[in-house]
Amino acid sequence: MLDRSQRNRYALGVLSRCVGQVLSLGAVLAQVASVGPAAAQANAAATRPVVAIAIAGPDAEASRLGASLSDSMRRLGVSVEWRAVTPGFPFGDTIRNLPATPEPDEQPTLARLSLDLRQPGVVILYLKDERRDRLLVRRFDAPSGIDEVAREQLVVTAADSIEAILAGQLVGTPRALQQPTRPPPKAPAATTSPPQLRATYSVAGGYTTSWIGPGALAQGAFLGLKWDRPAWGAGVGVRGYFPWLVDSQGVDALRIRFTVLGLRARAWTGWQITPRVSTLMGLGLVGDATQVSPRTSEPAAAIASDPYWAFDAAFQGYVGLAFQGRGWAVTGVVGADATARAVRYAVEVQGGRRNAFAPSRFRPFLELELAASFLR
């Protein structure tokens, strides 16, 4: 039999052991409670679908688009795995050449999303469904760059496609049907022939004005035929100056009326500035027949000369600017005639033969020409 003191000590020992066991059990339960949520959270993250994303383009635009995509994927419960842009871009070939199944050391992915921002005004989105081996390609116009509107359009398209894949829907077309984009084969050099440069035949007419000499500014018209090729041409035509009057340089109260008809031949070469505008430079040969008709305001004046014709030749040089339309052309020309010899027009008056007018040997002119094609 235990006495009272021994029984008390025994009871205290049993009680202390029970309390120790209860405290140990509480510590274990607390540890389990604290570890459980973290483990569950880690386990949930490990089971989330993964989308691999690669963006090629300017860093600033790629960074803003990447942030928007990350937010969108997180709302879908999808983890994002960022992939570096490889030197093997373009995206089309890169994605089409990816294996249908991941490598052994690679985490399985739900889909691969690639965006090409490198082309001005255009964005191309590639999305590959890894589980079904299907490829979606979308091209977006972005004339203002990757602004907020374009970024929202890309994010919505990507999110809708990923959500469809998560729901088991088919996105895109089978990868086997996607044909890589390749440039068309070049034709053999031996069979390539240069384009045929065809001549253009046209009728041309217009207005001309020329400084003939002191006090003599002639105005007239011309008409001719032209034969044009892309870099050069030739033409023939007739020109005439309307009659004009000049004061005689040697006889008082005497005026001379001149009427000029002539033939001309030209050749020129041209340089194209734009598809419709070109410059030209040319040379020509002119033969003129000039009628010299003395006139006087005094009836009593004795003039023995009757009207007569004089013939003269000149060389000309010019430059021009032409505007070409469909079947027509307008050309502005500035140039000068240079006569082969000095010319003086004389009249018979009372007292003998007098020089009435001496035109300049150097005669600048302006022309405005309108040409219409009739045969090509």
Image (tube, rainbow, N blue to C red):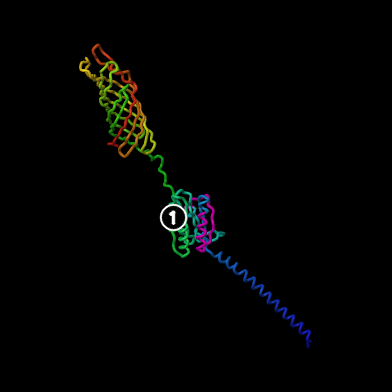
- Pinpoint residue 289: horizontal percent, then vertical percent: 26, 22
Quadrant where the N terminus sits is bottom right
The residue under the point 27% across, 16% down is 252
Q: Residue furthest left?
A: 299
Q: Give the image location of residue 13, x and y in percent.
A: 74, 80
Judged left or right of residue 283, residue 62 is right
Q: Which residues are magenta?
A: 64-93
Residue at numbered disc 1: 138
Quadrant of res 176: bottom left
Q: Position of residue 307 (x, y in %)?
A: 22, 19
Q: Nearer the viewer, residue 243 or 182?
A: 243
**For residue 140, above or below residue 249:** below
Q: Is disc 1 surrounded by few (<14), some (14 to 19) or many (20+) residues within 10 Å?
A: few
| SS assignment at label 1 | strand
Total numbered circles:
1
Seen in the picture, residue 58 relative to 286 is either above or below; the reply is: below
Picture quadrant of residue 192: top left
Which residue is found at the position 76% from the left and 85% from the top?
A: 7
Residue 308 can be seen, yes or no: no
282 up-or-down from 307: above or below? below
Q: Mark 1 belongs to which amino acid? A: Arg
Query: Residue, x 32% and y 35% (percent of image)?
Result: 330
